[in-house]
Amino acid sequence: MKDHLVRILTDKGNVRALACATTGLALEGARRHGTLPTASAALGRALTAGGLLGALLKTGQRVALKFEGNGPLRKIVVEAESTGAVHGYVAVPEVNMIRPDGKLDVAGALGKAGLLTVTKDLRMREPYTSTVQLVSSEIAEDVAYYLTESEQIPSAVGLGVFVDAEGIPASAGGFLVQALPQADPELLDLLMERIAALPPLSRLFLDGATPEDLLARLFEGIPYRTLEKRELAFVCSCSREKIDRVLISLGGEELADIIEREDSVAVTCEFCREVYTYSKEQVEELRRHALS
Ligand SMILES: [Zn+2]
């Protein structure tokens, strides 16, 4: 199943919901960053959250989620665009922590104390930034808390990544249910009950459920219409031109130093691990730009 997201709206009762399948995102994140199982799960959940929040943006807008905790993983950063392009990384990919019950300990890896910072580039003059405390460090609850407290939209979020015995994500997906203004409280109670009764999402998607199936299950007997289906993919926004600009911004003196010391320079994009290499001559050319 290709990664995709479905967005629906109830005919009555003012509830919107999104569900997505993100196995490809989780897999590509793990592959690019060489994550160990717990870090794979944490990154996969965060990438899925990025896909969900990205789907609420208008054309050309971007959102970034930064989870910073006091655990060994230290930081997870994810960026998503309105197009369905999502990319991200964990500060320390070599983290594997298992709970006593045998489950991957994402909360322990990220750390119980920390912050979630959400930055939205809405193409206005200043990006909108908001920071909340981590409430569970399991990612889903933290994103729900941010949406409910900071954006004032009561929200429920579920995220699941199933990591196989080799440490490779075998399935991933998630959902977001939001109460719009004047949402029907009885409908919300019913949805909360159904969400609480769901099996673990990682298992649900591993068993072959699609985002459409998940929404049909949550909204059984509640008329709704599908507003949108879109593809999601791990796509980075880095390019040689962007890296050129970063190097030029170091300034002529710094670049002259590099030319003196190094035969070539390799710059790695932290979001996707793409490596951009520059020969001495290419750095010299950038130095001329920096001076002009
Ligand atoms: Zn990149």
Image (cartoon, helix red, strand yellow):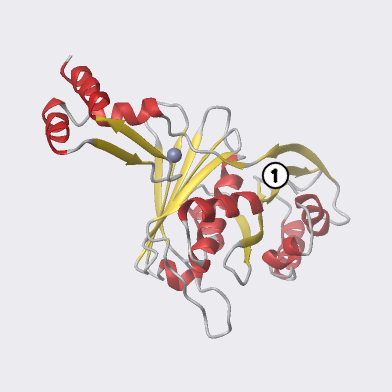
Name the residue at the front extreme.
263
Quarter of the picture holding the C terminus: top left
Q: Residue at x 42, y 66 (%)?
A: 110
Residue 206 versus residue 114: which sits nearer the camera?
206
Task: Say above or below: 225 vs 31.
Answer: above
Task: Say above or below: 9 vs 48.
Answer: above
Name the residue at the bottom extreme.
100
Residue 266 seen from this side = yes
Q: Is residue 277 left or right of residue 13?
A: left
Give x and y (percent) for residue 220.
86, 57
Residue 46 seen from this side = no
Kind of residue at disc 1: Leu
Q: Which residue is mark 1?
A: 5
Q: Residue at x 41, y 38 (%)?
A: 128
Q: Is residue 292 left or right of residue 103?
A: left
Disc 1: CA contacts within 10 A as few (<14), some (14-19) or many (>=20): many
